[in-house]
Amino acid sequence: MHAKLLSFLRPAGLVAGAVLAVGSGRATGTETDAFPLLDNYLLLSGLGGTFDGHAAAFQAREWTSKTGAGGIEDFRYSKDVSKDVTLKVDGHALGFTGDYLAHLNLAKADVASVDAGIERFRTFYDGVGGFFPLNSRWAALSTTNLSVDRRKLWLETTIALPNKPIFTLRVTDEQRFGAKDSTIWGDSDFTGLPTGQTISQVRKFYPGYRALDERHQTVEASVKHTIGKTTVEVRVLGDKVINNDTFYVTRFPGEIKTPTGTSPNNQVALYSQDGIDANTITAEAKASTVLSNTLTLHAAVDYHRLNSDLTGNRPLFTSTPTTAGAVVVTTYNFLGLLGGSHAKIYTGNLGLDWKPSKDLFVQVALRAEDSYISSAAAFSTVALASGSTTATALPVLNNEFSRVKETVTTPTVDLRYTGIRNIVVYGSASMRTVNGDERYATPFTTAVPSSSNLTYNDVTENHDNYTLGVNWKPSAAFNARAEVFNKDHDNKFVGYDVTTGTRYQLGYKFTGVKLTATLKPLPTLSFTSRFVVQTGKMQVTAATAAAYDSMDAKNYTFGESVDWNPTRQFYVQGNFNIVFDNINTIYPRAGVAANGLNANAILQDANNNYWNASALAGFVVDKNTDAQLQYTAYRTNNYLPVLAATTMPFGAGAQEYTVTLGLKHKFNNNLFGSARVGYYSSKNDTSGGNTNYTARLAYLSLEYRL
């Protein structure tokens, strides 16, 4: 949160698509600068404004509260307590955004250090779902203003005496709590489409959300020491996770069907509780030995042990019609989940750095892993009694289990060659191979599972990744980089024993090229160009069917940056990026089914094409005042409402732009002030314009040298 807010408050420079850029553009940290970089300072600031439109969308997009922010934006103070003891303190406290930090570091040279802190920040979300364009149906939660708070406490102590082992102990405690939107949406018949057609009138566009209650604690101890030419490090980590999250969604909201009603479905409200209590122990030892001027050996071994307890419930509440009116009854529920998982993972790494000449560096390594993971659980299902719409039958106990054994080997090679004038050649290759055996039973209610509940698979995976690149710098005015890459992954699951004949294969291949060039025709003018192309296919084989390509993916990205600094008093920077991204499904090969279903009308391609641009100009008003003007724009046009008759149009359509003006003034050598105003506009076609907003923000700050 703080980093995002600072993109409005105090960014150091321009990043393409940033909300706002501020700063003098010429601070170098010397006392002759109008705006030197200060070591010790206190920065007080306030941010506020007015906006029209959807408040939750504004907060989620801009990562700040609609009520603004204010307080201590930044504080830094360091002091030499004595000739060998240094104290450093930094932090911030911004009201209305839940953004706080208190950090302390105390160090005594060649003896020890203590680092401690507490941090908290808030991320905003919105509780809006989808928009159905044929009848302009808009779906949103009753409370769209959602947020998640994250808190972290840590304490780290290090003892580092000269020529002695270095001991480190670190304790952290992290929490995440609040509510956020979910991409799992509920069904609705409120589409205005006719019922009883080949293509259903039902669409999923009613929102769901997750209530989070999560905690993560770690204790880590390590010791590091160098003996001769060998450096050894031993680390032990204890990790505990306690999560109790709940997902809420309603299917067919508002459709309480009565005997004389016409709504085709009943309302079903459900929530799903997911509890995890996991404990992990990790022990690691690694060593590096300098064998000669050209060879260095690296080795490491790891051991991981996991024990976890799983809990959960998923009750469903259906509004069922009766002659007396709608009655809420429990329908098909999964209750009282109790289970657990256990894992043991052993990992070994062996690597060698070889530098046979000043121009060539080669690194070879081998990673091997052996893992065993088992899980078991039991839960009850409660359904409506046969022939009843108001009463449930007795609970039925279900059991399930799984077991996975895997061995993994991954050899890697990396090289770098600089023996050709003005050219650097580099490359890497890795080949990850997995051999495993997995067994699992889908939920069964008998004493032992039947063969229809069991699946046994031989698992084979091959993941090959290759990269080759060249950097060329013939002069100070020009440099270029070219890189090609290939990713070839193949996963096979072949059934045996009770599932003999079952076969499933999933693979994908991607190839691509990355090109970058920088041209500086003048000392004050430079151009940076970037071009990336990636294409690929995904292959699927199921059962005895022949292999077929289920996906073609294409991505083309082009970017250009221009920097012009004709004088010390003026500079301009411009950025432009455009992306063409397409994932092809079985369309247009799906065709028409025997029942008249037009699959091509449902299985559409996925497009994510967009462009963004920004321009920044900075200039000196007088010897104590700098100004900066920025414009940003973003556009995507993948929304096709015409598809709504047969499917849910998920493509994004949006237009956004911002205009900001900032001033920074030096009152004296110890006091600096900043003022900025900004205008934000966001239009969202995908939401039918329901999440549009415009905002006008103003920011004031005072920075005082301590």
Image (cartoon, helix red, strand yellow):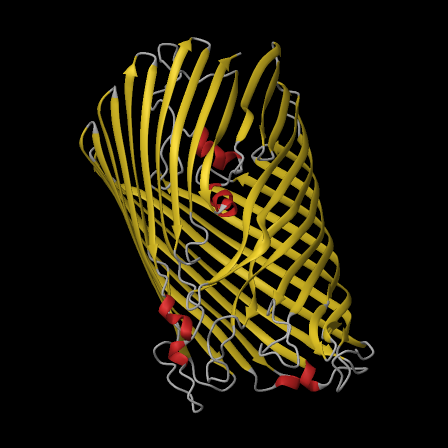
State whether residue 676 is above or below residue 528: above
Residue depicted at x 46% and y 55% = 412
Return the x and y of residue 372 as percentages of the image width and height. Answer: 68, 64
Residue depicted at x 66% and y 81% = 259
Residue depicted at x 32% and y 33% = 630
179 or 286: nearer the viewer: 179
Give the quadrant of residue 401: bottom right
Residue depicted at x 43% and y 40% = 294
Left/right placement of residue 208 relative to residue 603 reads right
User: Residue lying furthest bottom in this view?
Assistant: 594
517 or 657: nearer the viewer: 657
320 or 163: nearer the viewer: 320
Return the x and y of residue 358 as percentages of the image width and height. Answer: 35, 38
Return the x and y of residue 336 as percentages of the image width and height. Answer: 79, 66
Left/right placement of residue 342 relative to residue 427 reads right
State whether residue 101 is above or below residue 33: below
Is residue 123 at all visible to an observer of this figure? yes
- In the rendered picture of this protein, how many numbered marks are placed on residues? 0
User: Residue lying furthest top in this view?
Assistant: 668
User: Residue lying furthest left in this view?
Assistant: 521
Return the x and y of residue 696 as percentages of the image width and height. Answer: 41, 35
220 or 25: nearer the viewer: 25
Left/right placement of residue 48 relative to residue 373 reads left
State whether residue 206 is above or below residue 330: above
Is residue 168 at all visible to an observer of this figure? no
